[in-house]
């Protein structure tokens, strides 16, 4: 496996300033620069120069995914593998390298109509990460979290990430009212990307920000209530990755999961299984309902 972790995400939204304010005030991200500096839409979670890049867009969703590769040899191998499968790979420009703060980056048109990038040699930020809310995020060898994408061609996306990108299929979850989710990993995090079968258009389902402990999840839940952020699912614990979490709706429409205690995966002993529900909780919340008036069904 040449891909090591999820490095960064581009976020498109009709209201980038509103999304940044939400990320800072509710999630606990740290802006790279002050308002008006041109760098306030780059958001940190750790020692990386940024993990989220927020840009104007007509509709909300992930616009690009950046995967960190181990070294130059690994990047060459991944580029060759993509080319052998008929994928056109483009070299990143000097301006893009400077923006991502990497030695080299290549990109291609990935599944779910999302630009997919692979990079090596990312610089680390010159100053420590300090969340304005005192949040500690779980990243390091697991990357920045995970992203879940919706697609009417989810199985094609799964096959691409398994057979071309080299990801493992961690497991599958069939939810009677929530669809079928396919979870895929590239490091000790249970999944760094997942796909859910959608009969509608392609798009972003949610992004995970993993925090240090259950108290940090509860504090994020309190902030969501205080800022009147609508919930998508109540507190609960997943059966597959054991994540204790809740889901809220970001200003761009897609979800943000804030969770803790996610299970780490050892590829030498891991067995892929099929699940049909969560251990408890994660009841879906209809828009306009009170956060605790959960409707039947579960969301991922």
Image: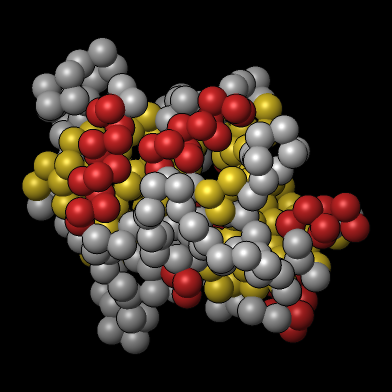
At 66% from the left and 34% from the top, the residue drawn is 35
Q: Quadrant of the C terminus?
A: top left
- Name the quadrant containing residue 295: top left
Colour logic: secondary structure
Question: Whole-percent x and y of residue 40?
Answer: 65, 40
Residue at 36% x, 80% y is: 267
Task: Determine the residue positioned at 20% across, 16% down.
Answer: 289
- Which residue of the protein is positioned furthest toward the bottom in this rendering? 268
Residue 32 x/y as whole percent: 64, 49
Q: Nearer the viewer, residue 247 or 151?
A: 247
- Above or below, 174 against 18 in this view is below
- Tell me what residue is drawn at x 29 percent, y 77 percent: 270
Q: Nearer the viewer, residue 221 or 131?
A: 131
Location of residue 253 in the rendering, given as x and y in whole percent from the top left corner: 45, 25
Tell me, yes or no, if residue 175 can be seen here. no
Question: Which quadrant of the figure has residue 214?
Answer: bottom left
Q: Is residue 15 above or below residue 239?
A: above
Q: Residue furthest right?
A: 94
Badge count: 0
Please tell me whether residue 256 is drawn above or below residue 254 in the rendered image.
below
Residue 33 in percent (x, y) is at: 67, 46
Is residue 73 visible in the rendered structure shown here? yes
Q: Nearer the viewer, residue 100 or 36?
A: 36
Corner quadrant of residue 1: bottom right
């Amino acid at each position: 496996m040449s891909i090591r972790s999820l490095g960064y995400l581009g976020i498109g939204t009709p209201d980038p300033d509103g999304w940044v304010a939400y990320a800072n005030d509710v999630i606990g991200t740290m802006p790279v620069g002050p308002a008006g500096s041109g760098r306030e839409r780059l958001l940190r979670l750790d020692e990386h120069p940024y993990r989220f890049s927020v840009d104007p867009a007509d509709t909300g969703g992930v616009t690009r995914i950046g995967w960190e590769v181990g070294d130059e040899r690994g990047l060459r191998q991944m580029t060759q593998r993509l080319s052998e499968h008929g994928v056109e790979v483009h070299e990143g420009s000097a301006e893009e390298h400077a923006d991502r703060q990497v030695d080299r980056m290549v990109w291609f048109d990935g599944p779910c109509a999302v630009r997919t990038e692979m990079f090596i040699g990312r610089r680390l930020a010159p100053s420590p990460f300090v969340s304005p809310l005192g949040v500690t995020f779980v990243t390091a060898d697991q990357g920045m979290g995970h992203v879940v994408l919706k697609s009417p061609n989810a199985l094609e996306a799964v096959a691409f990430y398994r057979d071309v990108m080299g990801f493992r299929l961690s497991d599958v979850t069939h939810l009677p009212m929530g669809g079928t989710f396919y979870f895929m990993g590239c490091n000790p995090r249970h999944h760094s990307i997942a796909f859910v079968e959608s009969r509608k258009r392609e798009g972003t389902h949610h992004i995970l920000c993993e925090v240090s402990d259950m108290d940090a999840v509860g504090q994020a839940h309190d902030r969501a209530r205080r800022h009147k952020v609508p919930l998508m699912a109540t507190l609960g614990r997943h059966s597959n990755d054991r994540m204790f979490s809740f889901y809220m709706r970001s200003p761009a429409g897609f979800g943000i999961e804030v969770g803790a205690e996610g299970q780490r995966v050892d590829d030498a002993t891991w067995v892929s299984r099929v699940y049909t529900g969560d251990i408890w909780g994660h009841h879906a919340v209809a828009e306009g309902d009170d956060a605790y008036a959960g409707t039947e069904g579960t969301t991922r």
